[in-house]
Image (cartoon, helix red, strand yellow):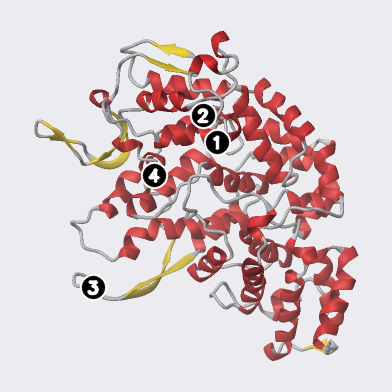
Amino acid sequence: MSVAILDRLSFGAQRADIETLQKTGVNAWIESQLHPTHDDPVLTQALNAAVLKISYGAGPDYSALSENRPLNLLSQPLSELWKLTDNQTKMAYEERMRPLRELMASRLLHAACSQWQIKELMVDFWLDHFNVHASDASMAVSMPSFERDCIRRHALGNFSDMLQAVATSTPMLIYLNNRNSRTGAPNENYARELFELHTLGKQHYLNDLYAKWREVPGALQGEPRGYIDQDVYEAARAFTGWVIEDGRALGGGQSLPRTGQFVYLDAWHDPYQKRILAQDFDPFASPMSDGKRVLEMLVKHPGTAQNLCEKLCRRFVADTPPTSLVHSSSKVWGDNIHHPQQVARVLSHIFASAEFNLAVHQPSPKKLKRPLELVISLARKLELPLAPSMGLINEMSAAGHRLYMWPTPDGHPDVTGYWLTPHTMRKRWMLAMGVMENWWGTGQVTPQQLSQGIAQPVDEAKLLAHHAEQLLGPQAAQSAIQKILSAQNFTPKGLLSAASDEWSGVRRNLAYMAMSPAFQWK
C-alpha cells in the first residue's frame, strides 16, 4: 500500500523512499514533503554536472556549432538574459532559445533527483494552471525567472502571493498582451484569463444568464456569485500601465530601459472610476492599487477556492473529483486564505481524506501517468541516471506533453481522454523503449546499473522478477512477466555475464514492463 501512495505523490517510488515511508509512516512522510526544510544536495549535484547539447548550422554572421554546454543560464537575472532578445546582435536562434532549453533539462532533473517530490508535482500543476506558451525569444529568456520566482517559490505557499507574482511576471505580461494595455486601449486578454482560468474558473462565468451586474445573484449585497463580461472589461482597465521595460519609446525623447522586468507606468493607467464584482473603485487611486484590489477580491471569492480545489482533487484523486472532497478542501482553503503555507495545508487535508485513500487503493480507475511522469518513474524505479536531451523532450512533446509549449492559456488537460489515444499510446510505448535503449542520448543502461544490489552471478529470470516487482508491484509482476515472455516465445538465458549483447533482451523486457497497464497508471 505504501508504494501506491508514493506512486501517486511522487514521480516514482524508489527503494529508499519505500523504506523511509515504512519506517516513519505515511502521515509523517507526507508532512515532511509538504514542508521542505533544506536544499537538496543530490539535485544540486545533478544540475551542476548536467550538460545539454546545442547545435546549429552556419549563418551569415556566425559559424556552425555543435557542443555540450552546462546549464549555466538558469540562475542568471532576467536583465542579463534579456540581451538575447536584441535583434541588433546577430546570433543563431538556438542561442536565443537556450535559456528555455536549459529550463526543460532542469525540469527533468528536478523531477528525477529532487528529494521533495510533492513540491515537484505541484510545480508541474502550477505551470499548467498559469500556463505560458514560450514560443519566442522574449518568452524563452524570461521563463527561468518565472519558474524560479513565481512558481517554485510559492508552490506550497500562499496562493495570493503566487497570483501577485504571476500578475507582474514578464512571460504572463507578454503572453496575454498586458504589456501593451494602456488607458484608452485596454487589452482584456489577461483580465479574461485571470477570471476564467487563474481564479474563479469557467463555472463562475454568468454572462450567458445575466447581462448586467445588478442581475447577478448576490451582487446587490456586494457578493456576486460569479462574473460577467462587464467585470472583465473593467478589470482590464484596472491593469492598464502594468508593462515591462522593453525599450519602447514613451514620447518626448524618452524610452523605457531594456531589462525585460516589470514596470508600472502611471501615464498609461486608466485612473477613472470602475465597478468590478459589484464593488466601486474610486478614481485616481494610488499607483497599482486598482489591479492589486482586483487580485485581492478574486483571491477571497469563494469561487476561487472551489475552482482551485476542484483542480487539485482532479490532479491527485480522480478525473471526476469527489464533490464531498472538493467542498471540504474549499473550506480549508478559505480558512487559510492568509496563511503562508495555505497550499500545503489544503494538500494535507486532501491526502488525509478517505476519498483520496479510496482512490489510491482501489483497482480502478486510476490516474494515467503523463509522459514526464512515465519517463521519470521508469528512471527512478530502476534507479538509472537520466541525462536530459532535447531528443527526449521532443519525444515527450509528440506524446502530448509539451513542456512550456502548450499553445493555449488553459494548460494541458488533466483527464485520461487527452493522454490516451491510439497515437499517444504508441508514443508512450516508444518512450519506454527509447530510454532503455538510449535512443536520445539519455544514457546507456549498463549491466552494472541493472544488477546493482543483486546477487552475483546474475540469473536472468530472478533479475526480471526483481525489477518487475519494483516497476509493477508484487501483484502484477508475475503475470506481466509471463505475458511478455510468452508473447516473444522468449526463455531467460540463466546466468548472465557482463557482455552487453546478453543484456539487450533484459533492457527490452524491462521496456515491455513499462508499456504494461500496471506501469502506465498510478
Residue holding disc 3: 59
| Res 457 seen here | no
Q: Nearer the viewer, residue 444 or 8?
A: 8
Q: Nearer the viewer, residue 209 or 76?
A: 209
Q: Are marks 4 and 3 in contact (CB under 8 Å)?
A: no
How far is mark 3 from mark 1, CA to CA?
Answer: 42 Å
Q: Earlier in the sequence, mark 4 or mark 3?
A: 3
Q: Nearer the viewer, mark 4 or mark 2?
A: 4
Residue 442: numbered disc: none
Q: Is residue 271 left or right of residue 488?
A: left
- Tell me the element at label 2: helix
Q: Amino acid at mark 1?
A: His
How far is mark 4 from mark 2, CA to CA?
Answer: 20 Å
* Structural crowding at the residue carrying mark 3, measured as other residues with C-alpha within 10 Å and reported as few (<14), some (14–19) or many (≥20): few
Residue holding disc 4: 175
How far is mark 4 from mark 3, CA to CA?
Answer: 29 Å
Relative image position of residue 105 (x, y in whole percent): 50, 60
Relative image position of residue 32 (x, y in whole percent): 72, 40
